[in-house]
Amino acid sequence: MTPVNVALIGYAFMGKAHSNAYRQVGPFFKPRLRPHLKVICGRTRAKVEEAAREYGWDEASTDWEEVVARKDIDIVDISTPGDLHAPIAIAAARAGKTVLCEKPLANTVAEADRMLAAVEKAGVIHMICHNYRRAPAVMLAKQLIDEGKLGEIRHYRGTYLQDWPADPKFPMVWRLDKATAGSGALGDLAAHSIDLARFLVGEITEVSGDLKTFITERPLQGDPRKKGKVTVDDASIALVRFDTGAIGTIEATRMALGRKNYNRFEINGSRGSVAFDMERMNELEVYLGSDPQAERGFKTVLATEPVHPYFKAWWPAGHIIGYEHTFIHTVYDLLEGMADRKQPSPSFVDGVRNQRVLAAIEKSAQTRRWVKV
Ligand SMILES: NC(=O)c1ccc[n+]([C@@H]2O[C@H](COP(=O)([O-])OP(=O)(O)OC[C@H]3O[C@@H](n4cnc5c(N)ncnc54)[C@H](O)[C@@H]3O)[C@@H](O)[C@H]2O)c1
């Protein structure tokens, strides 16, 4: 059990999820490297100090540059808005740290390329947090596909629907500002569907996409009488072609009233189908053409058996897990990668490829043409 010191930049939504992951991974997974919650970083001293107390970090800081340069830090975890991913990751790589970065990797392809070049030049371990890959049911879908149980994959249908800013009175926040977030539903939500498509089906080679902003102005947070301009998409849709010959659709929106975290995919192959919905994340719907005809039909597999990926570390079968566990699994794979000095996936290479698909959808929406990735 070798301790490794973590510096986490960002203490809010993902800061909380990642803090929990570093705390839980040790007792449940017993990784050879044990994360020590050394320093958490944000902008507002009182708030970051409160987060440090609540989540169990030794220290609080408001200066990421100083934190990233510290000799006693082994892992830099980037849980900030997109505009800070590149500067923090590049500084961390240059300082020789392992880097875990939230998605999308960057706000532009150029930034993502620079981040990948920096980690490769420094020879450090790098990972992007596409945590949905690490739901055991998603891993089971991957196993079935890799074993050929679904045959040749023909369709990927990814839908990621939310509704949090559907009310026009919802204020301007960083996620609605292109300079900070890079894009809207596209980079925030479709990036996850693209990652799952790449993980489960293959590389996306060509896209035809559209983007739409339904609510173009919103009240400012400090002064609701004033309005700010929304500079990102509320919704994105794309037809995609894969290098394997499969075709697909990827739809992401923040305007699907009633849908909270409807991250769903369905995959149809020549011999069977699978479907997954994050809001029922312990289950995988499976249809196998190889089942006897009289018994054929979609069945719901509860992916909580000890044979299902990651589940042995948790509870007896049927004792389900949740959203936060996907981050614990991510951190576990990062730690094992560090211990074996082997690059875990998804890495910054995946981040860059994902970013190129996002950029192609954006370009296709602007030019109203198919765009090669
Ligand atoms: N993997 C997932 O499922 C998932 C879910 C939500 C968000 N995300 C990604 O995580 C990242 C963060 O999103 P979030 O929802 O946690 O945002 P958030 O607004 O909840 O938190 C952002 C954090 O960044 C910190 N921050 C901003 N500027 C800073 C600076 N200059 N120095 C230090 N800290 C700074 C803020 O203090 C805050 O703690 C984004 O890239 C987002 O796309 C991923």
Image (cartoon, rainbow, N blue to C red):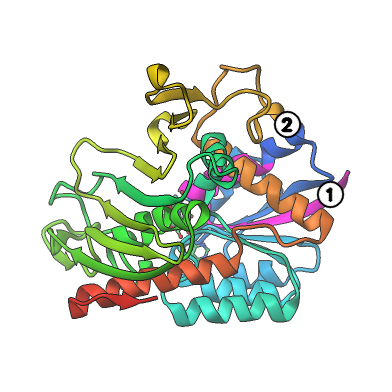
- Cα separation, mark 2 vs mark 1, equals 16 Å
Task: State the image coordinates of residue 254 (x, y, percent, origin top left).
Answer: 25, 50
Query: Which residue was labeled with disc 2?
Result: 28
State whether residue 338 is above or below residue 293.
Answer: below
Query: Which residue was labeled with disc 1?
Result: 3
Kindly identify the amino acid type of the residue bearing the numbered disc 2.
Phe
Task: State the image coordinates of residue 275 (x, y, percent, origin top left).
Answer: 39, 37
Q: Earlier in the sequence, mark 2 or mark 1?
A: 1
| Label 2 beta carbon within 8 A of ligand 1 | no
State whether residue 269 is above or below residue 113.
Answer: above
Regarding residue 12, the answer to whether it shows in the image is no
Q: Residue furthest right?
A: 1
Part of the protein shown in magenta: 1-22
Q: Tell me the residue at 39%/58% (across/down).
A: 246
Task: State the image coordinates of residue 104 (x, y, percent, origin top left).
Answer: 45, 63
Closer-to-camera residue (27/336): 336
